[in-house]
Every structure is written in C-alpha cells, then in structure tokens.
Amino acid sequence: MGKFILAHDLGTTGNKATLFDETGECVASSFSGYETFFPDALSVEQEPRHYWEAVVHSTRELIAKSGAKKEDIVALAFSGQMMGALPVDRKGNPLSRILIWADRRGVEEVEWVRERIDEERIYEITGHRLSANYSLAKILWFRNHHREIYEEAYKFLLAKDFVILRLTGEWVTDFSDASGTNLFDLSSEKWSEEILRAVGISEEKLPAVCPSTTVVGTLRPEAAEELGLSPHTQVVIGGGDGACAACGAGVVREGQAYHYLGSSSWIALASFSPFYDEKKRTFTFHHLERGLFMPTGTMQSAGGSYQWCRDALCEKEVECARELGVSTYALMDLQASLVPPGCENLLFLPYLLGERAPWWNPHARGVFLGLTPRHRKPHFIRAVLEGVALNLRIIFDVFREKNLEVENIRLIGGGARGSFWPQILASVLNVVVVRPQYLEEATSLGAAVCGGVGVGWYESIEVAQELVKIKDSFLPRPEEVRVYDTLYPIFSDAYRALQPIFDRLA
C-alpha cells in the first residue's frame, strides 16, 4: 500500500475524514456528525469538544475501513468552517462554546465599530464589508457581555485551529481562514494593526498567521495515541472551506472560477489581487498561497430553496421516491423538465433567509411572481431552480462588469448532482459549466493538496489542475439563453420594486 494524506473537513454538520493518495484519488472517507445549538434567534453555537471527538472517531473509522497502516499516513491536513470565535485559556481549554459563522448576535458591536473606523476602510483592508457574521463582532460581543471570558481568553481561535492546537500544541491559523475575521489585512497578509487599534483588541489575543501549506508540527504523543496514528505524522494547517473547495475544484490560477451549489451557494474566482466592488456586493478571501486571492459572492438559500420546495410542495414525490428507491430531487427535476424555460413567465425570488450577495438585505423574502391559472406544480419546481440561477447571474455579472472573464465555471457541491440544474445554470449564466470528478469531496481534496505541498509531494497548489479530473460539461443553449436574457432584468427589477415591502414586513 502507498502513502496517504488524511484530510479533515470540519463543516457545519460534522467532520469528514478522507484519505487521498499522491494522484489525488479518494481511497476512503468517514463522517462523524455533531450538534448545533440555537440559544436564540441570532445565536448559533457548537461545542468545541465535539470537534475533537468527531476527528478522533472519523480517523479511527477511516483507518479501519481503508486498511491503511498508521505509518502510511504521512500528514493530516485541514479544511474548516470559517468566521467563528472560540475563546480558549493558556492551556487550550475552551472557555465557552464557539460562536460559528451563522451567529449574528454582534449587531450592536458592528454599529460600535462603524463609529470608530469607516466601513469603506474596513472593506479596503479586509476585502469584506463589516458584518456581525465575522469573528470581529463575536470577539467584541464576548468583551461586552462576558468580560470575564474575554479577559481570561489567551487566544480566540477558529474551528480547525482549535483541533490543530490539540494535535500539535501550536497556536496558528492560515491566511485564508484569517481573511474571514474582519481583522486581516489582505494585501500585507497579516493582522491589521489599524483595525485592532481602532477596536482596542490586542494582537496577542489572535493566533500567528501562515500560508495554508505550512507544516505546523507533528502529533503530540497523547494525540497520536488517541487517533491511532504515528507521532511522526506531520500536521499541515490547510485552509478555510471556501479556499479549499476552490483548490479541490482546480481553481488555482487567475482566469478560473467555481460555483459551490449546496444549501447556500457561491461563485468564486482566483485572482492575483483583491477585487473591490464600489457597491460592496462581493467580497474577497485570501486563497491558499501567498499573493493569490479569491473574489466571492455568496447567496443564502440555493439548495435550501430547492429543499424547501421539496418539503412544502412535493410530498407525493417524496413518497414515490421512497417506494422506488430513487432521489426525490430526480423526480422533481423530471417534473420541471415538462415545462419550458422561463416557466411561462413565473419567477421565484429565492430570498427565504434574507440575502447576502448581491443585495445584503436580511429582510428580503421569498416570492413567486407572475402566477396565472395555467401554472402548475412543475412550473413552481422549475421556477425555484431558475430563480436561484438568476440570482447567481447577478453575482457573476459583478465580476464580468470589471472584465474578469473566465473560461468556464467548475460546479461542485451536493446540488451539482444530476444534469438538469447544471444545464439551467449554463444557459442562465451563459457560460460553459464543467463538473469535476469529486463534487462533495472537493473541499477535502483541496486540504489534501495543501498537505501534499507541505510534505513535499507537490511543488505548489497549481498541481490541482492536474489532479482534478473533469467528468462532464454543459454548454449554454442559445434558445434558452434568449429566454433568460429577457427575464433577467425583470428578475432584478422585481427585487428592487419589492424592497420597500420587505422592509415593511420586517
């Protein structure tokens, strides 16, 4: 048996451990879930010890499943959910649950920051607008509401970095994860002294930053024993889940783009410089290597809208799918294919959870518009798929307005399965959509590439262009493009016309 990289992807619902060989082939994987807590409407927390337990369980199960010897695993590498805040003491013990990316309790803290540093300046330094979702607001919330925790906190860590501390004893994060905190200077690739000074946070409360391909150490003996691995196993820090997904999709040089289609969804590019939009509709993360960036636009409810459609409208399809042993979504796609593109002018605004890009309006809501007596369930199903695609086109066009043309869009994520929705996306976006071999393992593959670079398997993350294999592609259909080009401005105008109504409903 050969040598392997073990990639851990610490997501929102659990940790996925995946074993990759040097050619980028997935040998085996294992998943271990954990709980999310919702103390109130704005608060979303997780228990950090559950991260460790999930990493231990998935590692041991993966080794047993694959038959790999512990000596054959040369490195662990990580991808992790971003934008969290976990206070830990000097011994690395958590002082509370971690406030994860979806936590928005720091609304008042955001307003306080806005009074001390111009929001345009925040966007210029960090590549992101000021938001309660980012780590800065969460750290300030601890300072304002749990001063004793803030004072005792030696560091505030992100999800994967807490696990890496348990593994190696090192207090570190990487550029990509740091770029989702509202505290990181993208261009200088370090914590922003200007922002830290303005908000009164000491840099000592933050971990050191390094490139995602950095070997931060080897396993502590007690950690190695608990995982069932050799203490000589190297630990490569890896990156935030978005940047790892980009690498796992093969988007590692300028002119490439990918689209992650899951419960939420985003379009991201690789770029040699941060991308600034005068309307702040998009934002920029750091990529996995120095001098490489990832302009991004994220919408809240993509696959989530289709899931709502399934649960609210397609009870019969759920029952049939169960009896036939097939996916409910496959039956929904089949129904949607019975109606023409454009759904005979039925539009769906996919704002079930408010919206980030392009509108940044938490009060936006989902809408069916243009309903007539001839519309039936298949129209509703297709309108949901088209509505998500039309909103993604607004995001994509922000980049095209600045002449950031791409050769194609690589499609990954759970929503990328099947062929019906990818074809709609190709025609709505009017761009070739290609699917890599690994759709849901792309993030893990990106982490594994970091590991491979760190231990010397590969020269740089550009090897992903060779490792990522394209399975199929979808070309825009001219007759469909014409229909969607007609509906596109109506879709955008519909949101603008309804915006005052959304505000009144809120």
Image (tube, rainbow, N blue to C red):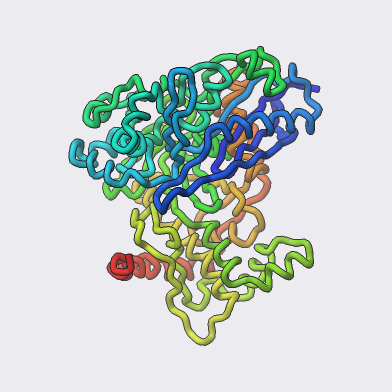
Query: At x 28% / y 41%, what residue is drawn?
Result: 109
Question: Where residue 411 sits: x, y (%)?
Answer: 57, 48
Residue 182 visible (yes or no): no
Please state which of residues 73 and 249 is positioned toward the viewer in this rendering: 73
State left or right for residue 406 relative to residue 320: left
Question: Where residue 155 sits: x, y (%)?
Answer: 40, 24
Quadrant position of residue 79: top right
Query: At x 34% / y 29%, what residue is drawn?
Result: 148
State left or right for residue 253 relative to residue 321: left
Please state which of residues 443 and 226 is positioned toward the viewer in this rendering: 226
Query: At x 41% / y 22%, what residue is drawn?
Result: 207
From the image, which quarter does the N terminus lie in?
Answer: top right
- Residue extending furthest toward the front: 148
373 is higher (above) or lower (below) than 444? below
- Residue extending furthest toward the left: 115
Please state which of residues 67 and 187 is positioned toward the viewer in this rendering: 67
Question: Where residue 238 sits: x, y (%)?
Answer: 54, 27
From the image, which quarter does the C terminus lie in?
Answer: bottom left
Residue 61 visible (yes or no): yes
State left or right for residue 259 relative to residue 400: right
Quadrant position of residue 426: bottom right
Number of numbered discs present? Answer: 0
285 is higher (above) or lower (below) than 210? below
Quadrant position of residue 447: top right
Query: At x 54% / y 53%, what residue is drawn?
Result: 263
Question: Where residue 467 sits: x, y (%)?
Answer: 65, 33
